[in-house]
Amino acid sequence: MNNIFQYIDSKDNEMISSLQELIRIRSVKDEPLPNMPYGKPINDALLHAISLAKSLGLDATNLDGHMALIDYGNGEETLGILAHLDVVPEGAGWVHPPYEAVIDGGKMFGRGTTDDKGAAVCALYALAAIKQSGVALNRKVRIMLGCDEESGWGDMAYYKAHQPLPDLAFSPDCEYPVINAEKGVLQLDVNKSLSGCNSSPDGLYVVSLKGGNRVNMVPDYAEAILKLSDNDTIESIQTVLGNDFVCTVGTDSCVNVACHGVSAHGSTPELGKNAICLLATALQKLDLSDCPTTSAINFISTYICGESDGLSLGLSMSDDASGSLTLNLGVIELISDKLLMQWDIRYPISFKPDDVLEKIGEAVSDFRLSVNVRHSLPPLFVDPNSEIVQKLLRVYARQTNAKSYCRYVGGATYARAMPNAVSFGPNMESDEHLAHQANEYVSLEMLNFNTRMIADAIVTLCT
């Protein structure tokens, strides 16, 4: 491995520059265009990654705008390395601009530095190092850089319909040591038709409430419009809500109320502060008219806010293998005639989607909410004694001189789309985790470390 590691060390500055170039492409999903199924920005990132791979002497092809495929070596079996180039929207609260890849204090800041462009670049340089070293592999290696991981996984569906599956795989899109279990994912549209709110024109009521960027992000901003009664003023509203809420004069005797929270990954809602819930809970302090929008706010405050485990909805599910269920209210639009919500639920691996949907149906039946599945992924569990797990555990122990073990997470990686696949890196369990949050960063030291880890994993699994 010495020659491989020497190559990686010699490319440190080049790798940092390559990642900066990729971070500067705002690869958020956009309207589809011909040969660009996820929009031009993501396609720009795809083409850039292919160009980088070719500059490193690797064979790279474009899978019809869905994925970049980088292949090396021969063999009857294939090792897949699964990463992605798309990112979630940046949100607010950044110290450094999210798409300038500023380096400060040994860290590179930017959306995608850890989720997951940093790992994608590390995988390319790791494979280039192996090719340069001349190490003989007995398995073909295929790096798969997807373009729709943060949304509907259309890229993975397209790949599976047009390409052979790898025999074993790992995804550097989570944490070390080895993630062999991932909770199931249910992303839901929860809606209700509202009517009759304007029948109380003299009362204080909520005209609209909206917040959130993506279902799999804890919303960091929410805003509402309140219709004032004859007895209310903007000053009286501000006094009740407090200084954490910004009240401004609106039109037609209305007041606008804004609230900031703290974003986090939708799989770990307990790490953020949900701005929608903060605002809904605060609005309950006001003397709101008895109307459908008030009932909707009461439902949110009573059954969703203040908890992340769905307890009030009867969703308190857990198992020893993967922990407890989590629920994130990621997006809302509440206006006078409709309530539209998006929920992100991560459920334990011993349960089925119908178990969760049945409980939700029971909880919302009295409120006549419609529940539809917008996206779902089954749980992942890979035998700890399997080859992929055991060899990656050895790689981690060898590179860190630390205890190696299996873990579970609520996050969803491409590993669950493939047979015999797990997550491996690129973050340490004890690291600060800012995926889907403001000020996401990767330490420059970790870039080198992750490239070494991926290179060692390839050699260990393919020799």
Image (spheres, helix red, strand yellow):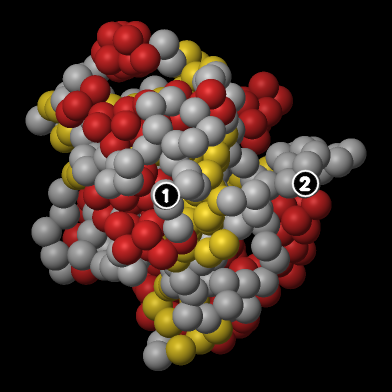
Q: What amino acid is at disc 1?
A: Asn
Please identify the quarter of the rendering in which residue 315 is found: top left
Identify the residue shown where x is 67% and y is 22%.
161
Front label number (1 vs 2): 1
Q: Earlier in the sequence, mark 1 or mark 2?
A: 2
Identify the residue shown where x is 62% and y is 78%.
100
Q: Quadrant of the N terminus?
A: bottom left
Residue nearest the observer in this picture, 304 or 251 = 251
Confirm whether residue 149 shows in the render.
Answer: yes
Number of marks drawn:
2
Please identify the quarter of the rendering in which residue 357 is found: top left
Residue farthest to the bottom, as pictured? 105
Q: Residue under label 1, please give it.
A: 231
User: How far, Cα to Cα, is label 1 from label 2?
Assistant: 50 Å
Which secondary structure, mark 1?
Answer: loop
Q: Residue under label 2, please give it.
A: 39
Horizontal side of 151 relative to 46 (left or right) equals left
Measured from the top left, where is residue 407 in percent x and y? 20, 44
